[in-house]
Image (cartoon, rainbow, N blue to C red):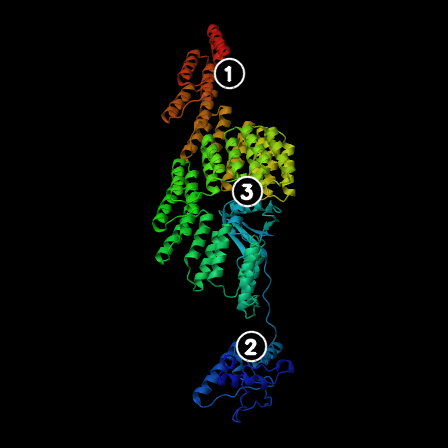
Amino acid sequence: MEGFLSLPTSQCSTSSLFTSRPHSSSAATSVSFSLQPPPQPPESNLRRPKSIKSSPKPKVPSNPLKNLTTTISTTTTTTSNNPSHVPAPIESEHTTHPLASKLRLSSKFFPPPPPPPSVLQDTQNETLISEPEAPSPQPQNPEKFRQDGKIFIGNLPNWIRKHEVAEFFRQFGPIKDVILIKAHNEIHRNAGFGFVIYGGPPPLAEKSAMKAVEFDGVEFHGRILTVKLDDGKRLMEKAEERARWVEGYQVQDCNNKSKWHQEREGSRKLFRKILESEPENWQKVVTAFERITKPARREFGLMVNYYARRGDMHRARETFERMRARGIEPTSHVYTNLIHAYAVGRDMEEALSCVRKMKEEGIEMTLVTYSILVGGFAKIGNSEAADHWFKEAKERHTPLNAIIYGNIIYAHCQTCNMERAEALVREMEEEGIDAPIDIYHTMMDGYTMIGNEEKCLIVFERLKECGFIPSVISYGCLINLYSKIGKVSKALEVSKMMECDGIKHNMKTYSMLINGFLKLKDWANAFAIFEDLVEDGLKPDVVLYNNIIRAFCGMGNMDRAIHTVKEMLKERHRPTTRTFMPIIHAFARAGEMRRAWEVFDVMRRSGCSPTVHTFNALILGLTEKRQMEKAVEILDEMTLAGISPNEHTYTTIMHGYASLGDTAKAFGYFTKLRNEGLEIDVYTYEALLKACCKSGRMQSALAVTKEMSARKIPRNTFVYNILVDGWARRGDVWEAADLMQQMKQEGVQPDIHTYTSFINACCKAGDMLKSEENERDFICV
């Protein structure tokens, strides 16, 4: 015990210096470092500090840097001329021993006294008083520093990223740059404001900025943004600060003091405790990690794993690189956590780069690593890559477990390769690995995707035979099956069976039933299921609200749809683009374009960026009202917002010009659609045929039908109706009759519009007998 607490003799003699310092009584408390008797006081050759009479202060030039240079050069010269001479220190009542500042432990027990005022400081103060103050720079006009196309954004969330801001403000024009002002104490968070700079020529950039400013007060991720044009004050302040620095003014430095006052071990224990008890509170977890003065490999590994479970692959990588920057070499466990982060984020290219790095560093891949790779490729639907890593795991690790088998079976079920999935189940059973209930659910979900009701029921019965009790997931697979194949009545029977077994519905099972009724356009029953959900005490989520809004729009009850949006906001659910899409589409189809535009503006102000489908709904409403100029203007707005039109956009505009009989513009947009490499389908050709027949250009219509045959696009009833109507307008009964024969040969069933057009052709040609024959055929059909 004595040897453990004792220090060397030299250290003990040094520690005795603490008691001889002329501090106050509170600072003079002695601390014993040894159980041995204290050493003898030093010999008389140790000089005591003496008071020196103050001498007149030398005059110092106005520039303190010159004075410092002169002092250093004088001292250097004196020392070089007389090497044996040692300059005596300037002593005062606060003089301490020169070793005291070098002792690490001394700063903890005896804080050093404040330094005496230096000669330079006193002289500089005298100089500042005596000399006249230098003139400050003249204030400048902020407008001179204003940049075209630059806007200020305030009240941003502290966690927001550049790409999210750019994605939202891109709808007003092309963006050149996004500047987020970082917080002074946390560089990973912003200070709540920033700037967006629009690109392009100055007039276009300024126009985009003005459009963005109109949305001042828009809601963005739960915050009401302040959006205004940049006034140039920030750049002006930087210019003035630079000018003051050049003229010799001192700029106050930010003194960021550290907040890591807890000991390392206590911080590590607190971090692990928060990680286990409050994993959902990510801010608290990150704060606890940052408080660890010197994290070890274990803490870094836990943090990478935490980000991996959240799917935040960028922060997981950042933590991993921080660990390597500290000189801590990663292990297989840490690499596996990083690969897991990329797998959850569906970035398998980066996951494979980590695997290559592991192999380069000679780190062995575990079975868990292989299982994560197989599961990652299963999520993105790449069953071939999943098979490759499964086979490699089979070669290097035997036996395998149920987890990796479950992942590879899921991969093949997602690609509807149920034969391979069945073979893997048999292989697993042959190796003596018991299949958990999750694999039964995976197989049922696979049979649901291909619509195989019989095998899905077989797996359900097999599940019960193996001693498993069906859960809400088991019944949910059956409900999903019957909802997808249109047998909603059987889905309701499964629902009642589930309730009889004492299993309550959850949000997903209710959503499946509602989706089943929505497919049948049974809006009333869909809303009835929604009421049952509310009565059971469940709170609808955003997806469920979107579905019920779609039901109200299908019923034509637009007031209830808008009221549901308000209920979402009351429940603090953030509406999405899918929330507003059916409302805009319903108003556009009804011809109420004013209300459609109002909902479109509300959507933007709610922080939802418009998509190509939103713009297509507006274009559809305008073309049905034959307002083609306004419809084409929306194309320009889409381009400005960075949204490319798709084939439905151009097809809708072609149908609009076809209704007007404007063949030239219809063919012009068809050429543009083909040049952009978009898909051409039967609806596109319908628009061209409609334009040709409307304008009486039947030869052009025949050329279009030949191109359809060359592309192997079959003609449906609507195509034949357009052609028959075109010949009927000209009174050419023979061509119309020939088309009727072609329909019979190709097995295309004529409808009431086909017969009406043909009878009209007969009447125009004066062939009433032929008209009566077709009328009798229609009655027989």
**Distance between the alpha carbons at the discs numbered 3 and 2:** 58 Å
Q: Nearer the viewer, residue 190 or 777?
A: 777
Q: In this view, does 20 lie above or below 550?
A: below
Q: Kindly state the secondary structure of the residue where label 1 is placed.
A: helix
Q: Nearer the viewer, residue 688 or 531?
A: 531
**Distance between the alpha carbons at the discs numbered 1 and 3:** 43 Å
Give the labeled residue for mark 2. 107
Q: Nearer the viewer, residue 355 or 593?
A: 355
Corner quadrant of residue 111: bottom right
Tell me if mark 1 has few (under 14), some (14-19) or many (20+) residues whose alpha carbon lies within 10 angstroms of its own.
Answer: few
From this viewpoint, which residue is outermost toward the left? 395
| Nearest to N terminus: mark 2 or mark 1 | 2
Q: What residue type is labelled 2?
A: Ser
From this viewpoint, which residue is outermost toward the bottom? 44
Instruction: Tell whether label 1 touches label 2 (CB within 8 Å).
Output: no
Q: Kindly state the secondary structure of the residue where label 3 is placed.
A: loop
Which mark, residue 752? 1
| Nearest to N terminus: mark 3 or mark 2 | 2
Percent position (x, y) of residue 454?
A: 46, 30
Give the labeled residue for mark 3. 609
Q: Kindly state the secondary structure of the residue where label 2 is placed.
A: helix
Q: Is residue 431 above or below residue 182?
A: above
Percent position (x, y) of residue 401?
A: 42, 48
Query: Residue drawn at (35%, 57%), measured in percent from left and top?
Result: 360
Please state which of the two labelled residues, at mark 2 or mark 1, is closer to the viewer: 2
Q: Do we see residue 69 in this rendering?
A: yes
Q: Which amino acid does label 3 sit on?
A: Ser
Q: In this view, does 70 lie above or below 564?
A: below
